[in-house]
Image (spheres, helix red, strand yellow):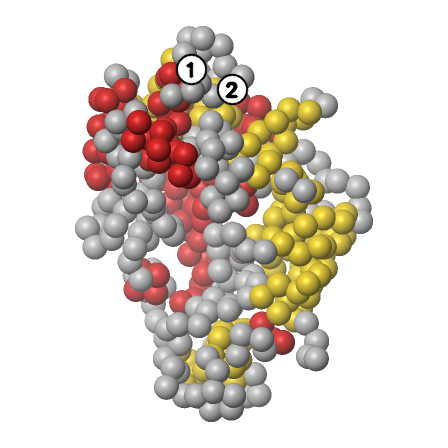
Amino acid sequence: MKPPALPIAPGERVVVGLSGGVDSAVTAAVLRHAGAAVEPVFMKNWEEDDREGECSASDDLAEAEAVCSQLGLHLRTVNFSTEYWDRVFEPFLAAAAAGRTPNPDVWCNQEIKFGELFRYADDLGVSRIATGHYARIVERAGRHRLLKGRDRAKDQSYFLYRVGQDSLARALFPLGDRTKSEVRAMAEAATLPNHARPDSTGICFIGERPFREFLARWIPPSPGPVETVDGERIGTHRGLAYHTLGQRRGLGIGGRRGGSGEPWYVAGKNLERNVLIVAQGAAHPRLATRSLTAGSASWIAGEPPPFPLDCEAVTRYRGPGSTSRVTPFGTDRLRVELDPPQWGVAPGQSVVLYAGEECLGGAIIEETATAPAR
């Protein structure tokens, strides 16, 4: 296993967030091979261990322990469930109840992985922290810059735009220059016991369970009408919180073809009337966002760039980017013009801004304006 080109000294202590997955396992392995004194930590962030889902904390812990046994490392465990509930899950529920589509992975990175884990490392007297994120950190002109991962299909910089300079200065992303296939091959070559373990998908506390059924535990159903963009009622929804803009499946109107005969998509929500608004056909203009406003802006550099800012804007993970002009209003709010318009942009998600490979920062989408009909 070739040692990574990382800014570490032989014997330097590095806390590695070990999740039980192959990415964090390879992170620990390459750092150990490079001569670091690896101190793996397993974070339990979700108190409920529900066997109905694919994300079991006990299974993850067992995998992490097996990896440490193979590598000759001592695994520490820490419970951040209270912090996760207060700072990630409760805001997630509040946003969902308000009709938005929140992204808890963004807040988990800020509050837990690059918040609580760093404070825990401080208690251990360790300054460096490594994770299995597919992203890169470079230092230029005295600033730490966040770059996309080399493997564009796995790049996770979208979820890291709220991580600040202090954290980036201490963080290591050994997989940033690797592809997923390379990481799998490295895990197998190192005979790591989880080398063939499937990647986790979605939000960990939901796992592979249907999102609507999971959310209904905390947000009760609130049925209301499903209406077309022209105001015709064509069905009944169970609750606005269970749907997101651009959604196609699970609308309960699949048998109604009408009009063009094309599938229906969620095009909007009217919270006052508890109405779910749908449009027919993926090319419907109500599904294309030409501009948006966003709040709670966060900048990797620690301060805003000069405005107006011409950059690339990405409105959902792995989504295509748009050439954009960004202008500020208020203290931490942005207006973003999108060219071309973006499809299915949902309030509550993040708009993340890039200059080439560099992630500049981003903000939480508040409102959207659709493209004019052609």
On the image, the x and y values in percent for residue 307 come to: 80, 46
On the image, the x and y values in percent for residue 54 come to: 25, 50
Say if residue 170 shows up in the picture: yes
Element class at badge 1: loop
- Choose between 172 and 216: the one closer to the eye: 172
Where is mark 1, residue-wise?
34
Amino acid type of the residue that numbered disc 1 sits on in the rendered structure: Ala
On the image, the x and y values in percent for residue 322 come to: 66, 56
Q: What residue is drawn where x is 25% and y is 16%?
A: 72
3 up-or-down from 287: above or below: above
Where is mark 2, residue-wise?
6
Circle 2 Cα neighbour tier, 10 Å, few/some/many (<14 / 14–19 / ≥20): few
- Choose between 14 and 222: the one closer to the eye: 14
Q: What residue is drawn where x is 63% and y is 40%?
A: 357
Are discs 2 and 1 less than 8 Å apart at CB?
Answer: yes
Mark 2 and mark 1 lie on one chain; the one further toward the N terminus is 2
Give residue 222's quadrant in the image. Answer: bottom left
How far separated are the C-alphas under marks 2 and 1? 9 Å
- Choose between 295 and 27: the one closer to the eye: 27
Locate residue 20 relative to residue 344 in the image: left or right: left
Element class at badge 2: loop
250 up-or-down from 64: above or below: below
132 up-or-down from 208: above or below: above
Locate residue 6 relative to residue 21 in the image: left or right: right
Locate residue 120 relative to residue 290 in the image: left or right: left
On the image, the x and y values in percent for residue 74 come to: 27, 18
Quadrant location of the C terminus? bottom right
Q: What residue is drawn where x is 45% and y is 57%?
A: 94
Say if residue 13 shows up in the picture: no
Quadrant location of the N terminus? top left
